[in-house]
Image (cartoon, rainbow, N blue to C red):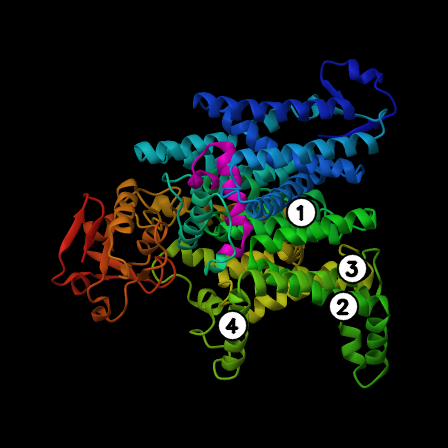
Amino acid sequence: MNLSNHSTVNDSRVNSSTIISWDIKRLLLVILSLQLSIWGLYGIQSLFGFKVPLLSQILPFIYLTFVPGILLLKVLKFDNLNRVERLIYSVGSSLVILMVVGLVTNYFLQLTGISQPLSVIYILMVMTLMVIILSALAYIREDPDKVYSVDLTEYLTLTNLILVTIPFLTILGSYIINVYGNNTLIFLTLSLIAVVPLLAAFDKMPKKSYPLAIFVVSLSLLLHISLISNFIYGRDAFYEYYVSTITLKNLYWTPNLSYELNALMSITILPTIYQKFCNISLAYVFKAIYPFLFALVPLTLYELFRKYVCSTNSFLACFFMVSIISFYAEMPQLLRQEIGEIFFVLSLLLLMDSKLDETRKYFLLVLFLVGITFSHYSMAYYFLFLILATALFHKLIKTGKIRAFHQKIKGGRFKKLGKVLPLEKLETPSHVSIKLSYVALVVVFILSWYIFVSRGTTYTDLVAVVVSIYNNLISEFLDIGGSEAMNIALTGSQTYITLKIVTAFNLLATFFISLGLFYSLYMNKKGKSVHFIPEYLILSIINFVLWILAIVIPYFSSILTANRLYHITLLILAPFVIIGGVKFFNLFRIEKTKALKILSVFLVVFYVFNVGMVGSLIGEETSMGLDSSVADFPRANEQELVGARWLASNKIAGLQSFGDMYRMPIMGAFDWDKVDDFPKNVTWIGGNYIYLGTVNTETGTALIDGGRFSGGKYVSMKGWIGIKDRIYDNGKATIYK
């Protein structure tokens, strides 16, 4: 939406059939109608037990995801935002409001003796009251003569219509794979996505379509993995699912559980509200709604990058980031991190914005601080570290300490070093402000929440990782075995040729980042170009150093894993891939426009290897979204789920259940307390249970010591089964004791 303000409703353009205009009264009328519709759907379901198809899912989703945030931005008078900023800030604000409303309602209603405070009726009553209050405040604060207009001709273009079809093709293609085992449509859809960066680089796509393009590409890549099978997938996701079901079944949240994930509203209260309102299974909250929300992360980054590079470079940087497997395949396995990253990037976008009113800006920053703390402890700690480091350098810049240090070097014994170091760009203060009060609040709130609400478990884990890094720093420096990132970088996959090529591409991308970051610092020093403000350059340097440390320091990436750390650092470093790539080709006297086109071809080749298209053609089953149901991935079929539920319901209390790397989490979705991976010493199993899935029973092997693509190996199960009795068998899942 390209929003434009007019002094009166009678603007001549309003009469055009392609113009949609509204003032505050019309906006509030639409919101009120939606609110009444939600009550109507709830009444029909409660009185007659009937759920209106589609409307019972779509209207509550729109209501929960957009309405609270839209009203809040109206109350705060954020009138100078562009259409993308208004969208992403609205969604981010809505998500925080949902978690806070759920938490507050949960606490106070339990004090009154209500045993299920997260029931729809209570949340809906509180939400309705909040919407009424926010609507009244918005009406009072809004100029009644202000009119917003949208020209539909700007959006109903052939390019946009084609882009909008991509997610629907993805959904249909996933359905065909699930039912018929045919991946043709998904393959064609992924091929269509491959054309998008070429259209941008060759200037064949309007720049106004870039935001829509990056959103639909991101969403489609996420859905082509998350919608495979009818249940969630991935090790962490099964654990998150189990913790979520506790709150969902009880319809109240309690901090008195021992699970560290229980402190995260992103997988307790938030999915409970979405599930109850939208009338879909909890699995599909995670498989459909969460990917939609997470697809806003690249869209937010597009806006962030566009502050410093051109629209095309920003778009290509985002495309590179979403092409990496850690974005579209790993993140849907990390439900809490999906939500946490939304608030992480929104906070970065706000911090780097010098045009917003300070009071309103910091109100949203505090709101998103609550969001990131409620969502993911690792992202919260990472954000805390970045804020502390950036605030420190920001203070040094503002007080002239960086300039004084640079002058001292240039005038002392290290004159040559002073001339080489590109510190001049870091000497000039920007208009961005990072208030010390906000930094203090970040530290106090994050540490307090995880120390007291999560009983200190995540804080203890963080300290343990730091101690492990310190203890092994000298003894195992540059050791491949101790550094997961170095192991990936230097050895790659030992089995799949396509994954070795992907590893090479990532090494080349790291080189481009190095070149791009150096160029941005050095050329800014020379005054030939000004791309980034000092604060963003500081963030970039910190993230680049962290990635390098993950390669050379043993166990540095333990808390996040190397793939996840690479993904997180790219949230800031992605533009330097494009800058460095273009400058690399410039070394061969290739001018900028042509270099960008060549780089876009590189991105497409990188993409088709990453998403498994090449692997699928040559018989390497490396993508769950493309390959047959025969290939082994961390997913579950219906019979395996039935077997896992049976085991959770019928096992003897106190006994352990063992499974291999991909089957153990399936059991954990229904009983996480007493499940574990197969031990190396088979005698440890003793009289406990053994759970086998379809791959186990059909091949007679079990996956141990890691996943298929991370050092795992398949071994015979004879040693585990031994003389145990088979107590359950449904043809796809077998249980021994």
Instruction: Name the N-terminal-most of marks 3 and 2.
Output: 2
For label 4, the SS is: helix
Query: Which segment did they paint magenta?
Result: 262-285
Viewer-side residue, 100 vs 493: 100
The residues bearing labels 3 and 1 have C-alpha atoms spaced at a distance of: 27 Å
For label 1, the SS is: helix
Q: Residues within 10 Å of mark 2 (few under 14, many from 20)?
A: some
Residue under the image location 61 percent in, 24 percent down: 158
Q: Check disc 3 and give the amino acid type.
A: Ile
Q: Name the residue under label 3.
A: 434
Q: Can residue 52 be seen in this view?
A: no
What label does residue 90 carry, if any? none
Side of 586 where 511 appears, left or right: left
Point out the residue furthest to the bottom here.
Answer: 413
Viewer-side residue, 432 vs 67: 67
For label 3, the SS is: loop
The residues bearing labels 4 and 1 have C-alpha atoms spaced at a distance of: 37 Å
Height in image: 229 above or below 143?
below
Q: Check disc 4 and give the amino acid type.
A: Val
Q: Check disc 2 and give the amino acid type.
A: Phe
The residues bearing labels 2 and 1 have C-alpha atoms spaced at a distance of: 27 Å
Instruction: Name the N-terminal-most of marks 3 and 1.
Output: 1
Q: Main secondary structure of the magenta part?
A: helix
Q: Mark 4 points at which residue?
A: 465
Q: Name the residue under label 2.
A: 393
Question: In the image, residue 463 lies at what x, y percent?
Answer: 55, 73
Q: Mark 1 points at which residue?
A: 313
